[in-house]
């Protein structure tokens, strides 16, 4: 292909030279014809003039002819001789050019036939312009580069190994490609939705951050108020016991009541029992702070009040009631609590304990307090001289005031 283009390009150069030589040949032929005709005329004139020169030597003036001087005539002859010389030189060049044209034409004709053209004219018609040749050369260069790149890729061992494998299942591959396209479309839609959701969440996060900054002071105030409320209600996790504020205040009063109650409990139990206030945390998250426990001097260990017997519980409760009355009297500025009523409970006491309880009640009466006892125990009838006796009969109940001890 390159050799053909080179020969075609060389043919273009030969054709141009051929055209130039043809033109030059035509011009030279014309000049030659003119020079030949002139030369013949000049030769005839020269012979005549030579004869006339011999004859008219004496007649120099006549010998000048149309020329003003002989020198002018000589110059004209010199110029004529120069033109003849030039014509002869041009004739030689024309002969050489003609020979060259003939040789080049022959070469061009053979080259055209070698390239498949029947005539030189057909080869001349097939000549391309420089721009077209340049375009073809660029296409050839690009084709060679692409061929080299494809050759390099095809020489890859992985591709050669793949080429040696059995043909792929085109239908399965097409189905897999369609499925992959669907998955890609779904993934793209999901990515777009995620991007939109991310933008929305970013905006919401900014709004949330603004709201958080605005609510932080309120949250701190709420945290303080909630902590105070938990302390007041006894629900604070930082507190040692779940004690409400009112229970905390009552606990201080309870300690005073227990101190006053122990004075009489010591007498009733002959020094065996002592009450004490307990703020230990109650089981199962129950409210704490107003607990009581009792210490048995016989064992030296505290125990719960619900482990006392019926009689022990009665005089322990009576001691607390009397202690409460003393504390109320003290808190009231010394105003006495003149009257106390005790309802039942004496039936749970043995005889010795009953006498000790009644001695305590008698000591209260000695301090100008009135103690009313509601009971059906016969022993109390012998110890209490002023009684109100209620008798029941079918007609109704009657009340009798008795002032003497029963026998």
Image (cartoon, rainbow, N blue to C red):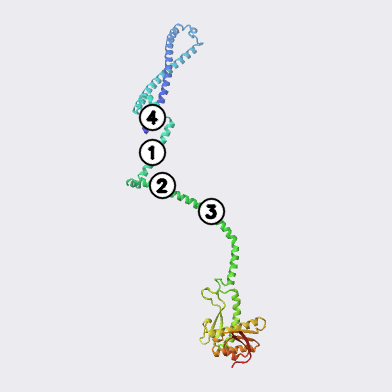
Tell me the CA gap for discs 1 and 3: 55 Å
Q: Is residue 369 left or right of residue 100?
A: right
The residue pinned by badge 1 equals 144
Q: Is 94 drawn above or below residue 374 in the view shown?
A: above
- Mark 3 surroundings within 10 Å by alpha-carbon count, few (fewer than 14), some (14 through 19), many (20 or more): few
The residue pinned by badge 4 equals 8
- Element type at mark 3: helix
The residue pinned by badge 3 equals 200
Please report contact status of discs 2 and 1: CB closer than 8 Å, yes or no: no
- In this rendering, the label closer to the viewer, 4 or 2: 2
Pointer 4 or 3: first along the chain: 4
- Give the quarter of the figure containing the N terminus: top left
Tell me the CA gap for discs 4 and 3: 72 Å
- Mark 1 surroundings within 10 Å by alpha-carbon count, few (fewer than 14), some (14 through 19), many (20 or more): few
- Element type at mark 1: helix
Q: Residue at x 44, y 49 (%)?
A: 184
Pointer 1 or 4: first along the chain: 4
Q: Nearer the viewer, residue 357 or 197?
A: 357
Tell me the CA gap for discs 2 and 3: 33 Å
Tell me the CA gap for discs 4 and 2: 53 Å
Residue lying furthest bottom: 407
Tell me the CA gap for discs 1 and 4: 21 Å
- In this rendering, the label closer to the viewer, 1 or 4: 1
Pointer 2 or 1: first along the chain: 1
- Give the quarter of the figure containing the C terminus: bottom right
Q: Residue at x 48, y 51 (%)?
A: 191
Where residue 147 appears, as percent x and y from the top left, is 38, 40
């Amino acid at each position: 292909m390159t050799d053909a283009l080179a020969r075609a390009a060389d043919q273009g150069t030969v054709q141009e030279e051929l055209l130039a030589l043809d033109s030059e040949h035509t011009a030279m032929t014309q000049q030659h014809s003119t020079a030949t005709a002139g030369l013949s005329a000049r030769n005839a004139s020269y012979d005549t003039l030579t004869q006339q020169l011999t004859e008219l030597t004496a007649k120099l003036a006549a010998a000048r002819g149309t020329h003003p001087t002989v020198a002018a005539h000589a110059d004209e002859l010199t110029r004529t001789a120069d033109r003849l010389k030039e014509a002869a030189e041009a004739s030689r060049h024309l002969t050489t050019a003609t020979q060259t044209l003939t040789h080049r034409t022959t070469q061009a004709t053979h080259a055209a036939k070698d390239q498949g053209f029947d005539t030189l004219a057909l080869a001349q018609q097939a000549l391309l312009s420089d721009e077209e040749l340049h375009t073809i050369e660029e296409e050839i260069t690009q084709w060679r580069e692409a061929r080299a790149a494809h050759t390099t890729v095809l020489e890859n061992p992985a591709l050669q190994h793949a080429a040696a494998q059995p043909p792929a299942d085109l239908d399965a591959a097409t189905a897999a490609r369609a499925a992959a396209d669907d998955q890609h479309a779904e993934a793209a839609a999901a990515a777009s939705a995620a991007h939109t959701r991310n933008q929305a969440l970013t905006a919401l996060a900014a709004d949330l951050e603004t709201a958080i900054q605005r609510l932080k002071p309120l949250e701190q105030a709420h945290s303080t108020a909630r902590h105070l409320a938990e302390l007041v209600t006894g629900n604070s996790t930082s507190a040692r016991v779940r004690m409400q504020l009112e229970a905390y205040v009552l606990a201080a009063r309870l300690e005073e009541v227990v101190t006053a109650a122990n004075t009489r409990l010591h007498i009733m139990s002959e020094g065996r029992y002592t009450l004490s206030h307990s703020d230990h945390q109650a089981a199962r998250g129950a409210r704490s702070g107003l607990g009581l426990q009792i210490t048995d001097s016989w064992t030296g260990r505290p125990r719960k009040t619900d482990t006392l017997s019926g009689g022990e519980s009665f005089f322990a409760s009576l001691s607390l009631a009397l202690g409460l009355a003393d504390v109320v009297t003290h808190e009231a500025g010394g105003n006495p609590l003149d009257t106390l009523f005790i309802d039942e409970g004496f039936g749970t006491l043995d005889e010795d304990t009953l006498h000790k309880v009644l001695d305590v009640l008698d000591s209260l009466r000695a301090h100008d307090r009135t103690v009313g006892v509601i009971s059906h125990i016969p022993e109390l009838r012998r110890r209490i001289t002023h009684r109100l006796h209620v008798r029941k009969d079918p007609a109704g109940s009657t009340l009798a005031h008795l002032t003497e001890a029963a026998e």
